[in-house]
Amino acid sequence: MDDKIINDLLVKNKRLIDMVIERARRDFADDIAIIGLTGSFSTNDYHEKSDLDLIIINNTKRGREIRSCFILEDVGYDIYCTPWDTRIEAQANLESPMISCLLDLQILYSAKPEYMDKLNGYRQKALDELSKPIGKACLDRAKKDINLAKQKYANAAISEELGVVRHAVGSVLYHSINAVVSMNNTYIKRGIKRYLEELSSYTHLPKDFFEDYIAVINAKEVGALRQNALKLLKNLDELHKSMTQEFVQNSIPTYENLNGSYEELWCNYRNKVLTSCDSNDKNYAFHSALAAQSYLDEMTKHIGTRKYNLMKHFDSDNLQLFKNAFIDAMDDYLKEYEKVGRKAVKFDIFEELYAHYMNPKGGSN
């Protein structure tokens, strides 16, 4: 762009900014807290048709009346509001991909000094989280986007319409990018136009990431879209698993955290599994198996018990095979109790239960 075009753009932006601030001062003195600049004009990465990205933080619902969406000289503008307790809070907690809108916001207007104090408090919260070494917190955030990417892939798998599949696969790519950002415990600073440049500077990237990234964009057919998205997802998932093993300390079963878990396994699943398998009720057995597997997986994740793969033993034509595998798993789980000196809370007669329950501090469990 030549100097005249750049100057005209900056003059137009100033007029727009002054207009919005004037309206805020006149009509929303108590409703609008802060107005700031983000986007391409804040990073000097704009083009002739770039719009003006303003962040308007509103204190009240009434403040939303400042919103407006319009077209001026062939450029569209969206003047919208960002509430403290939703978008700003999410950005401070690193739960939003728009963290740059908080951390890199160029302040144009603040109604009161205390609003800047409030904003800086949110900024510091985000900075404190970003300053931590890679660990459970950022990998948990990444896992949420990985799960969302998998859900979007399911949409691609059940449709045969090219546009629907491409949109679903594009969403897989979007959430995969967010997951990679979280796995590196950072944030996108320059927007979608510079995704590839920013991502290329990261330490932790999935295998063949940029190859798969571009392959998703270039895919012409439904099959190619699905294939490329699946490869991207598998490599992303593998990276997350390897980083979890490297950076997250596994839980270890202890006397305290095992408390009640064996009894809950017995209560919620044992008799369902035994009854359904003995009666050859395939539907009942299958759903009991699913529930038992989910419970054991949760115990592995949160307590650190060993991984049990019950579902590989499920055979609707031989339910006794699964029943035996489940009993073996329960026996093995009880050994975790024994390792830490805990006994299962089990009674043969009601009177024993009554004495224990009515005198909880008198027992060892």
Image (spheres, rainbow, N blue to C red):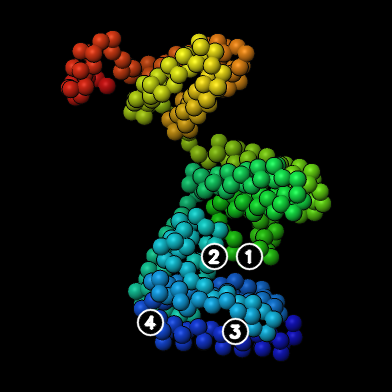
Horizontal and vertical percent position of residue 349 = 25, 10
Of residues 330 and 141, the one drawn nearer to the viewer in this rendering: 330
Answer whether residue 243 is visible to the viewer in this image.
yes
Q: Which residue occupies 66% across, 73% down?
A: 45
Q: Which residue is mark 1?
A: 191
Identify the amino acid type marked 3: Asn
Q: Earlier in the sequence, mark 4 or mark 1?
A: 4
Q: Earlier in the sequence, mark 4 or mark 2?
A: 4
Q: Earlier in the sequence, mark 2 or mark 3?
A: 3
Disc 2 residue crowd, few under 14, some 14–19, many 20+, Cα 10 Å: some
Question: Element type at marker 2?
Answer: helix
Dividing the picture into quarters, in which one does residue 316 lie? top right
Identify the amino acid type marked 4: Ala
Identify the amino acid type marked 2: Ser
Q: Which residue is mark 4?
A: 29
Q: Nearer the viewer, mark 2 or mark 3?
A: 3
Of residues 252 and 99, the one drawn nearer to the viewer in this rendering: 99
Question: Element type at marker 1?
Answer: loop
Q: Which residue occupies 62% across, 13% down?
A: 317
Relative to 314, say whether 200 is above or below.
below
Q: Earlier in the sequence, mark 2 or mark 1?
A: 2
Residue 100's disc number: 2
Dividing the picture into quarters, in which one does residue 207 lie? top right
Please state the total of marks drawn on the protein image.
Answer: 4
Question: Element type at marker 3?
Answer: helix
Q: CA distance from mark 3 to mark 1?
A: 19 Å
Relative to 277, say whether 145 is above or below.
below
Of residues 53 and 171, the one drawn nearer to the viewer in this rendering: 171
Q: CA distance from mark 2 to mark 1?
A: 9 Å
Q: Which residue is mark 3?
A: 13
Horizontal and vertical percent position of residue 219 = 80, 51
